[in-house]
Amino acid sequence: MLTIHGLVESRLVTAAISSAPPPEGRAVWYDLIEPSEEEDHFVEDELGIAVPTRDEMVEIEESSRLYEEGGVLYMTALVPLLSDTDTPRVTPVTFVLTADRLVTVRYERPRSFEIFRQRAERGAVVLADGRSVLIGLLETVVDRLADALERIGADIERLSSDVFLPRREREKGLEEAITAIGRSGGTLARIDSSIVSLTRLFHYLGEENRHDRLDRDGRARLATLELDARSLAEHVKSIDTRVNFLLSATLGLVGVEQNTIVKIFSVLAVVFMPPTLIASIYGMNFHAMPELDMPWGYPMALGLMLVSVGTTFAVFKWKRWL
């Protein structure tokens, strides 16, 4: 789908090319979502650019993600997707910046794009051209990353408080806690990859600004974005340290509980060893055992078993092995 956004008195107006005429005012943002070949060709003919394919967007090399061609900047970054759900991930988004127009190519629907669009249509964001649209979008993406990190930090804090409670007071078992910690760690890794890709984009855009692609306000906002990205990267490291500590501590608690169970079985085996010995002795088929013919033989054997159990148990308590 292709959506063209225009500007009317610094306010964003929107029209989908497939269902409505072009927007009022000057078109500044062409948003391609899972574009068809016809939509790709339309944008290419309209702006004189080459729209990158999906395969080109997922290239690992930085030179393939950030490059300039014919005075047009092509910048691909990983943007968080579904960051406020239990199944967050990242998706590649390509930002193509011409002199004063922006083209975005994406195959998913990150919430940050919708948030920015709604704010811009209300006039809450001051826009002048495609370059200010780009900065506004990047600011919204960074805000979403910060929100996602706050949620992960809060989740880790709750898990930490729960794990270190006595076993009967825990809301989750240790196995569930390990699963939750692993899920948080995976989300954190994806957020870190997004921050790294955005940091590279900010640096590249700043370097290319030697050609005065951004105005003074844009340069100041880009510098703030770089500082925010560095702060988020440090925050990721801090949370990652807590995740690793909590995972190690939880695995240690699992080991302690398993050792406790093994200890209990070992103690029970030792406690019942003397009565087993007594029962084995009186279970032998010898005629010359006087207790077998005595009326008190059976109670005596039971009494010896009980005394041996009690004595062994008392010794264990005295040694503090229980």
Image (cartoon, rainbow, N blue to C red):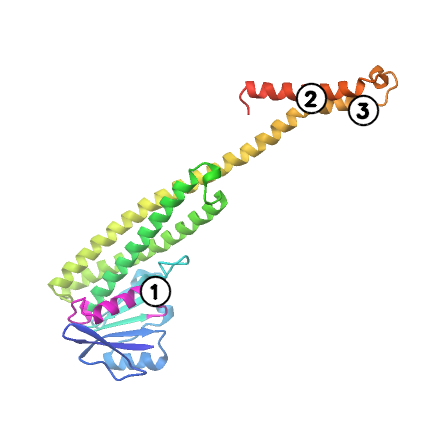
Q: Residue furthest right?
A: 287
User: Which label belongs to residue 286?
Assistant: none
Compared to 168, does 193 lie above or below? below
Q: Label 1 amino acid? A: Pro
Q: Residue at x 36, y 79 (%)?
A: 36
Are dots 3 and 2 in contact, CB under 8 Å?
A: no
Q: Which mark is on residue 283?
A: 3
Residue 110 x, y percent position in the rendering = 33, 65
- Which image quadrant is residue 261 in? top right
| Numbered tag placed on residue 306 in the rendering | 2
Badge 3 local density, few (<14 within 10 Å), some, or many (20+)?
A: few
Q: Which residues are magenta?
A: 106-132
Query: Which quadrant holds residue 165?
Result: top left
Disc with the residue nearer the chain's start (2 vs 1):
1
Q: Which is nearer the N-term, disc 3 or disc 1?
A: 1
Residue 265 in sight here: yes
Q: Amino acid at mark 2?
A: Leu
Q: Nearer the viewer, mark 3 or mark 1?
A: 3
**Residue 116 percent across, percent down from the top left:** 25, 66
Position of the C terminus, as image quadrant, is top right
Mark 2: which secondary structure? Answer: helix
Q: Residues within 10 Å of mark 1 (few under 14, many from 20)?
A: many
Q: Which residue is mark 1?
A: 92
Q: Nearer the viewer, residue 142 or 123?
A: 123
Q: Residue at x 24, y 65 (%)?
A: 137
Amino acid, disc 3 = Gly
